[in-house]
Image: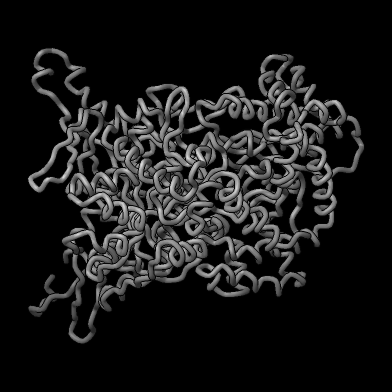
Amino acid sequence: MSNGNGSTKYDGKHAPHWKKHICRTEHVPVQVQDDRTGMDIETLKRAFLDNLYYIQAKDKGWATAHDFFMALSYTVRDRLLHRWLKTVEQTYFQKDVKVVCYLSAEYLIGPQLSKNLTNVGMYEQARQVVRESAGLDLYDLLEQEDEPGLGNGGLGRLAACFLDSLSTLEIPAIGYGIRYEYGIFQQTIRNGTQVEVPDRWLRFGNPWEIPRPDYTVEVKFGGHTEAHTDERGRYQVRWIPQKTILGTPYDIPMVGYNTNTVNTLRLWSAKASEDFNLQIFNSGDFANAVADKVYSENITKVLYPNDNNYQGRELRLMQEYFFVSCSLQDIIRIYLRSHNNFDQFPNKCAIQINDTHPAIGIAELMRLLIDVHQLGWDEAWDITQKSFGFTNHTLLPEALERWAISVFGRLLPRHLEIIFEINQRFLDRVRSQYPGDDGKLSRLSLIEEGAEKQVRMAHLACVGSHAINGVAELHTELVKNNLFPDFYQVFPEKFSNKTNGVTPRRWMLIANPKLALLITEKIGKGWIKNLEELKQLEAFVEDGEFRHRWEQIKQENKQDLAEYILQTTGIHVDANSLFDIQVKRLHEYKRQHLNLLRVITFYNYIKQNPNADVVPRTAIFAGKAAPGYAMAKLIIQLINSVANVVNNDPDIGDRLKVVFLENYNVSVAQRIYPSADLSEQISTAGKEASGTSNMKFAMNGALTIGTLDGANVEIRDRVGHENFFLFGLDAAEVLQRKAQGYHPWDYYNSNPQLKQAIDQIASGYFSKGDSNLFKPLVESLKNRDDYMLFADYQSYIECQQRVDEAYRDRDTWWRKSILNSARTGYFSSDRTIREYARDIWHVQSVPVTLEDEQEENAAIQLNVPLARV
């Protein structure tokens, strides 16, 4: 606008917001930051309100809290885009770097706004902007985010931690998965039972994703194959599909902490090649006019459809192949932008299979190289083996995917041919090494014989990968010696251990900001990216003031959780009681019902000794059971039935409370981990691959009660045996006891406390007199007890008594708590990713540098988020 003398003075209202301005008055230069990248408060306010107006189409007077959340999210996303493009297009592509391609059917990434604000260092700026521009608390906006339920549990959460670490360590990477329209179900508890409700996480849109329709690919299903000889006399196979489905990618930025690197999570959504048939519609058959669209989009409709029926299993196989085919086609497309042959493919693409779900990728890459790109078998197989790595996540044979030949061949006829060829060549090699050993051939074969032949997907992954790793030291030894002993004998060089880790940014900095601030005050900020620096906390263990502040923070966190429990369940719990917590997916081997037997035993003790001096306990459970897993759902019902009796018994009062928190997810987990006194890690030894909740609890100062299973072994060794409550049989003893003949009735009849607890469940004491309700669970325990609850029961009870004794001495307890946190640096996912990068992927960090001008506007600050006041 004119200032009266012919010159122009910027008033902050009329200049366009999409560019950076340097305006001058008569003597003073005025610099206004780019509204898309600027980080000062005034620029952020302007961008925030612009996004509210121009994207949400709302002004402040009409905007809801969700509108403000969306506006803030877009404001943050704008500040990621320059880094994102600089990372992918102007650094990785131009330098032709090797990229980690992580294939996972699950990504439980959690809320993104809090993570992105923290990693970009603008948490406090956002708090001020929201307060001054909208009169709201940032916390209220964070609560508006619909969490993407794109995972089932530990597997998906691990993948999310890995993406955070890959970006933080500046390692080139792209995560590939499925954009489920409905994620893991929303769990509600009605009359004590789990009820599944669709997870409509996309109902209001996702501000973090960017659709990439220009990268859409075709995926084939069904049909038949035709063999022919080409003009050069080479044997070729053409796949004539019955149906072709389109895969469209949606990209989500994965920003690192205190770095310019922004990697990509690329999720695939299924679309019909022809959405709408006008001819059929005009004939009056309106439903069939869109039948192809419905059929196609079902593939990415829901996470893990119930596979207790044929249709469910078929859909699950289609899901897995769909996202793997889309991903590999995309990987090849990106590679061929810089190369005109496949000579360098394994040197530029490290493809990691996260469990057996993406194992079909071995056969798919072979198909693409042989059938589409015309490579010979030997060359294609060499490239495939050198490109793939395989992470095993389970020791349960039933969890290792097998697909009936009939289903597999009908959906993927070309892949079945390729798998038969892989198997033939592999077994020929085995025969030459072990002549006459038919048993070994049978055990190694990719095809399992039986009434109905099946494809063993884990075997395919073992044969087609150059590296096979377990996820904890014990787990890896069991993989080598128990799960895949023959593969270990044939390929010993392939096997290694990569103990899991979790990101301290999500699980300490964001989840436990008060503790993070205390730690930072004492040892600086370096621990956020180098968790081993937590060892410096050991110097403060004998500092009485530090212990008091540590205890105070834990108590405040417990009070926050107690309020959340009251709001969501109506149960009043004493925040001064010992918070005894078990949160994880519901499964018999994780033994939530062993924990519950101890609760019942403690309840009975108080009833029989009403004046006893006991340590008050609040037993907190959370977790989802797979919709088709009847026994797990029955355990949830039993937990709630016991809670209903215990919590309403006037003889018990606040000495014991039982709580089941519904709809366990990342957001709920962030409330729980900082509040725990005791972490329950009580799976049957030899069944849990690693566990990651054990790490999150220990980082936040909880003491662990557990068996020598999974990563518990390594946690115990690092935090100190005296700071870990150990009970139960170890993995070798479990196998020995079963080999000798395990008889749960012997334990039941010889242990009065155990017998009383089981008899109470069986009699209907906890189910309003219904003696049939929990009969399947009781009969399973008394007659089989597959996971040996009865064998470990007495040891568990005695160990819990040691917990009570330790908790009475609070000063010593807090020393143990501090040491648990201080010694968990090894369990950072940063360390895990460094090991993968060094030993399996052979990739290097590639720093991303922004131009000076942009860096000035988009500079990252090392803020630690403050807790809500």
Q: Is residue 23 above or below residue 808?
A: below
Instruction: Give residue 450's position: percent from left, percent from top.
Output: 47, 26
- Looking at the rendered structure, the number of numbered marks drawn on it comes to 0
Residue at 34%, 30% in the rendered image: 408
Residue 491: % across, % down = 48, 54
Image-quadrant location for residue 857: bottom left
Q: 548 or 776, which is in the foreground? A: 776
- 142 left or right of 643 in image: left
Tell me if residue 63 can be seen. Answer: no
The answer to whether 137 is drawn above or below residue 599 in the figure is below
Relative height, residue 129 to residue 233 (above, below)? below
Name the residue nearer the viewer: 581 or 626.
Answer: 626
| Residue 96 appears anywhere in the view | yes
Q: Is residue 602 left or right of residue 232?
A: right
Q: Is residue 703 left or right of residue 499?
A: right
Please identify the quadrant where the N terminus is shown. Answer: bottom left
Q: Quadrant of the C terminus?
A: bottom right
- Whole-percent x, y for residue 38 in the image: 30, 68
Measuring from the top left, give residue 755's x and y in whole percent.
83, 26
Examine the image and state in which quarter residue 622 appears.
Answer: top right
